[in-house]
Image (cartoon, rainbow, N blue to C red):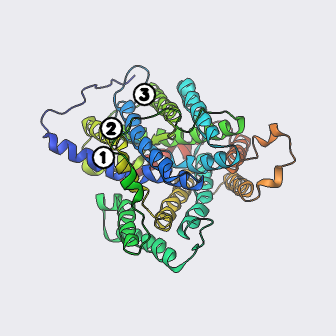
Amino acid sequence: MSQIDNRIFVKNRHPLQTFSLGLQHVLAMYAGAVIVPLIVGGNLGFSQEQITYLVAIDLFMCGIATLLQVFANRWFGIGMPVVLGCAFQAVTPMIAIGKDFGISYIYGAIIAMGLFVILFGGLFGKLIRLFPPVVTGSVVTIIGVTLIPVAFNDLGGGQGNPDFGSPTNLLLGFGVLVFIVIMNKLSGGFIRAISILLGLVIGTTIASFMGQVDFTPVAEASWFHAVQPFYFGVPKFNMTAILTMIIVAMVGIAESTGVFMALGKIVGRDVDSKDLARGYRAEGLAITIGGIFNAFPYTTYSQNVGLIQMSRVKTRDVIVVAGCLLMLLGLVPKIAALTTLIPKSVLGGAMVAMFGMVVSSGLRMLGSQVDMNRHENLLIIACSVGMGLGVTVVPQLFASLPSTVRILTDNGIVAGTFTAMVLNLLFNGTKQPTSELQKDEEEISHSVAS
């Protein structure tokens, strides 16, 4: 097993420098962190007060989850400078579970998901064979595509809004999207990394001059509150919901594995199976605690790995500062309430870019890690994506089937994932082709360089 260096703080760096570097990590992941509770809360009809709580507890738990990975021990933590945030791939499943079963079932499924990861963290090195790039890439693509309608509904002003599709909403939404595109074209480095955050801030500022922003939630929010377990009530459990979130966990673990390996190359550390198991368990523990406090599933954020590569600061003290800052922000509801000021149209414009990147991420995984010249791989992708989208668009197709069968057909992500896994086992077995293993290494190196 690789040795873990438990020295956290660097003696020859000025505290202000460490603080600035930690703040930079917070800014790089902030938009991705807060947009998940805004989307989920908005689509499930939460009140402003409830959404403010979601954002606050989410930021607090991002800090907790990050520190669980940094402070490694025998059982938990990868012990490397990794930042955790909300798992984007969980957005669509959580919304679907909330609408089909109720809010309590979301958190029951999240708690079960976290416990599953903790209990089986040591076996995921073997189970990950069921999620080679052709399966993972297909699932990520399905998740991204099913999120796009959510983005466009918000861009228009939100479903049920009498001003849906008004020129004002379209101007704000597409204006934010264009701004993000221009920023990515003209800037680089850290500015590009926070282009979505800048788009949200500028879009909301312009919207305020147009009378589209209500500052009441900020005025009414308190300056401090304590975290509260089971804020939305006692969690409830449903097998379909739990299976859905376990699949999300498997996809997240597959992505985390790539991040851990890439980060190991950056910091010059050989990451072995025991390191990975501790990293998985830390994520599972963070997910479980998040479910108890009505937050979200958490996973490693690759944008922060890119920031480490860009800044060339590889020590964990910076990440400790970032984790503490996130916890501090989560304890101040007024800061959380600021994010609820973002109009739906502004949020929707940013979401088009963000969710489109989820789609492109899936396509990149398929294009760079999968042999697209093999007809079998093309068939796996075609059938799994087709099944996932079909179930999402026409969910009533399987309404007459027994409930035991509908566990696999009530959710597009579950149906698409199950299809991809079965077809992959049929065509490829459990052994990943050598060419794909080589491409995995190339993809990790490409991610580090990016």
Q: Position of residue 160 (x, y in %)?
A: 63, 66
Using the numbered discs, state the Cα–Cα distance from disc 2 to disc 1 in whole angstroms: 8 Å
Residue 362 picture location, percent across and down: 55, 54
Q: In which image quadrant can residue 124 be found?
A: top right
Q: Which residue in the protein does label 3 denote?
A: 275
Q: Which residue is mark 2?
A: 81
Which kind of residue does numbered mark 3 sit on?
Asp
Foreground mark, 2 or 3, reads 2
Badge 2: residue crowd in 10 Å (few <14, some 14–19, many ≥20): many
Furthest-top residue in view? 74
Q: Earlier in the sequence, mark 2 or mark 3?
A: 2
Mark 1 closeness class: few <14, some 14–19, many ≥20 residues within 10 Å = many
Q: Could you tell me which quadrant the N terminus lies in?
A: top left
Residue occupying the point 31% across, 36% down: 268
Secondary structure, mark 1, is helix
Kindly identify the amino acid type of the residue bearing the numbered disc 2.
Pro
The alpha-carbon separation of the residues under discs 2 and 3 comes to 14 Å
Q: Residue furthest bottom?
A: 167
- How far apart are labels 1 and 3 at the CA level? 20 Å
The answer to whether mark 2 and mark 1 are in CB contact below 8 A is yes
Residue 261 is at least partly visible in this image:
no
**Mark 1 or mark 3, earlier in chain:** 3
Query: Where does residue 178 sit, x and y in percent of width and height?
Result: 43, 73
Occupied quadrant, residue 22: top left
Q: Is residue 211 visible?
A: yes
Mark 1 belongs to which amino acid? Ile
The disc, 2 or 1, on the residue closer to the chain's N-terminal end is 2
- Give SS at disc 2: loop
Residue that mark 1 sits on:
308
In which image quadrant can residue 375 be found? bottom right
| In the image: residue 204, left or right of residue 367 | left
